[in-house]
Amino acid sequence: MGFTMSLNFILLIAMVATNILSLYHLSSTVQSPKPPPPTPVPDHLLRQLHTIRATINHLTAHHNPSTATSKPTSTVPKDLILHSQIGPIASSCHNHPELLHRYMNYTPFSTCPFDPDLQETLILNGCHPLPRRRCFSKTPSKPPSSLPLNRFPTSLPDSSVIWNKYSCKSFACLSQNNPTGFDLDAQTSSLTKYSSELDLPVNQFMQLAKSANSVIRLGIDIGGGAGTFAAIMKKSYNVTMLTTTMNVNAPYNEAVALRGLVPLHLPLQQRLPVFDETMDLVRCGRAVNRWIPVTVMEFMLYDLDRVLRGGGYLWLDRFFSKGVDLEKVYGPLIGKLGYKKVKWAVANKTYPSGLKHGEVYLTALLQKPVSK
């Protein structure tokens, strides 16, 4: 019994000593100097995280009504909740909840609402790909019995387009009021003739590529409008060009498709849906200019680099900006790619009244290094 008491006493002493040691360690930890504060998170990332968190909570509350503590101000469409569970939704979509809810407020398994203006607004604000899935696209009431096989038809069939949302109701009207976009003859002339140092006719480009032993088979025309560049390349050189275009105030995508070409309904800030190093040519038309935010421009240029194979060409056709911005911003930005300058021509942008704002045009043909 004496041994048991002694053993218990020793264990008690050990436990007390352990507690005293723990208290000493805790007090020394509390009194030790504080570690340096972590690097602050940028405000734009915090705003994006808050937006994503709020959206997740919003959707979760609607999906599990028992967890909701207050009545929401607007009802989330059921198909938006369903889609969020099976596929990604771009975070930019959640920055425009009212537009997104209007777009997704449709009856599944029926005809989709015809709202191209709403689609364009969402896409241009970075909401892409659009999440509407389970409905049937609206078709023209009297589609044509045949479609043109010629890449340069004398006219495009008006009955292939739903014109309700456009001010013009025919391609003839568009050709007259928007010749830059729909006058096929004028577009062809601007792409095939040389009248100033800013011009790079298609046949001259193909000769430059041939002299460099470069094969041109596949390409993308960024902001290609009605697809005239792609039509020339297909008809004259059997080169397959994809055309990215938007339906801003006119049915550009339908026009491209009616010419037997492939339109991609994409905004400039969207990652191109093609694999790495697969394109021989990327051409940027006049849609690519100084109105694009510099950060968006930088992401776009590096995405174009991603899809171009080694030895492929980046063609900037009449990129316009202020001369000082080209020298200090856009020139260095393009130079970061490390491409060879095959052509680099700068000239003043003139108006009927003369020069304005010191604006200039840049036409550049750049070749990606074969290896990096």
Image (cartoon, rainbow, N blue to C red):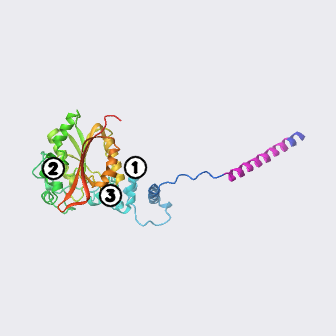
Is residue 306 placed above or below 98 in the rendered structure?
above
Labels 1 & 2 near each other (Cβ < 8 A) = no
Whether the magenta-drawn stretch holds residue 18 is answered as yes
Magenta span dominant secondary structure: helix
Mark with earlier residue (1, 2): 1
Identify the amino acid type marked 1.
Ile
Is residue 144 visible in this depiction of the protein? no
State which region is magenta. 7-32
Which x, y percent locates residue 312? 27, 38
Which x, y percent locates residue 243? 23, 47
Helix, strand or loop status at disc 3: helix
Which x, y percent locates residue 135? 29, 54
Quadrant of res 230: top left
| Image disc number at residue 190 | 2
Helix, strand or loop status at disc 1: helix
User: Badge 3: few (under 14), some or many (20 or more) residues near its Cα, within 10 Å?
Assistant: many
